[in-house]
Structure formats: C-alpha cells, structure tokens
Amino acid sequence: MPRKLIKKYLPDESSLRENKHLSWLGSSLHDPSLWHLTRKSVSRAFLVGIFCAFLPVPFQMIIAAVLALVIRSNIPISVGLVWLTNPLTMPPIFYFTYLVGSYLLNTPPMNIDFDLEKLHHILEQIWWPLLTGSVFCGVVFGVISYFVTSYFWVWHVRRTWSRRRLK
C-alpha cells in the first residue's frame, strides 16, 4: 500500500509533537487523525501542500500547517509538499504564475530580469498579477493533485487486492 512507502519518509509523530517550533499549535496536534495515512487525509494533504507551495509569501509551512489543522489533513505531508517551491524552483514557478496572472488580468507581462535590484523596483507593478496567478495555479494544481492522489490510492489498493486474489 502507499501507506508503507509514505511512512518510510515521514518524520516520527512524537518528534513533531515535541518540536518547540510547533508548540504554539497546542493540543490540536494530539489529534490522531492528523497523523494517520488514509486516502482522504493524504489527498487533502496534497491539496493543502500544493496550494501553499504556490503562494508567494514567507512562512508557507506555517500556513500549510494551519490549513491542515482546519481541513483535517495529514500535517507532515502538507508541510513537506510546500518544499516543491525551494530556492531552485521558485524563480521559474513564480515567473510562470506571474505570466498566468497577467493573462487572467489581461495585462501585458513585463520583461523581468532576475536581478534583485531591478526586481525590487518593479515589485509594486508585478505583485497583483503574481498574486492572482499564484492563487489560481495553487487552486488548480491543488485540486488536480487531490484527485490524482485519491485515484492513485484507489488504483493501488485494487491492484494489491487483485494480486492477493491471484495468489
């Protein structure tokens, strides 16, 4: 089952509960449904994690943890998926979301050089298309990942049961 594969790479539940940086979440971290690997909790975790990965804001992991608490998804997977946008992948992903936002807002995209000084000066002109495109892409790719994960889970379980029947 996918559960075995996922559990191999997840941090231990007790170490996350005892983490001093997560202590502000209080007793809500002690709910076992936030740590169990079920089709629904993992699918929701993909929705939360992918959505938060596309947000162009700092502290994406905290946002993912809070959203995981709200919709009862698996916290470690939700937080871990945020790292899809890391220092190497951020520039192309956020440039893509900026282009999507420009298209959605029907504004011509600016030619952006990835120079920090120039980027700081034009940030006030690009923030609205960037935010719009990021939220749009986060919702679209998050919903797609929810359904793909759910479908994959069902497919994998059916395949496992088929193999058991054949034996």
Image (tube, rainbow, N blue to C red):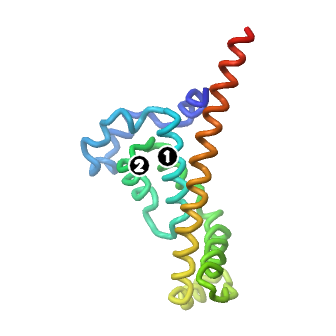
The spot of residue 30 in percent (x, y) is: 30, 36
Q: Amino acid at mark 1?
A: Ala
Q: Which residue is mark 2?
A: 68
- Location of residue 5 by image quarter: top right
Q: Quadrant of residue 16?
A: top left
Q: Is residue 157 left or right of residue 26?
A: right
- What numbered label is drawn on residue 45? 1
Label 1 SS: helix
What amino acid is found at the position of numbered circle 2 in the picture? Ala
Q: Are marks 2 and 1 in contact (CB under 8 Å)?
A: yes
From the viewer's perspective, is residue 16 above or below residue 164? Answer: below
Query: Where the C terminus falls, by quadrant?
Result: top right
Along the line of sight, the residue nearer the viewer: 165 or 36: 165
Q: Residue furthest top?
A: 167
Vertical order, 151 against 71 (above or below): above
Secondary structure beneath dot 2 equals helix
Above-or-below relation of 84 to 12? below
Q: Height in image: 163 above or below 26?
A: above
Residue 55 image position (x, y, % from top left): 51, 66
**Toward which corner of the image does residue 120 lie, by quadrant?**
bottom right
Residue farthest toward the right in the current orientation of the protein: 166
Residue for point 66% across, 77% down: 99
Q: Position of residue 53 (x, y in %)?
A: 54, 59
Tell me what residue is drawn at x 60 percent, y 31 percent. 2
- Identify which residue, 16 or 54, lies in the foreground: 54
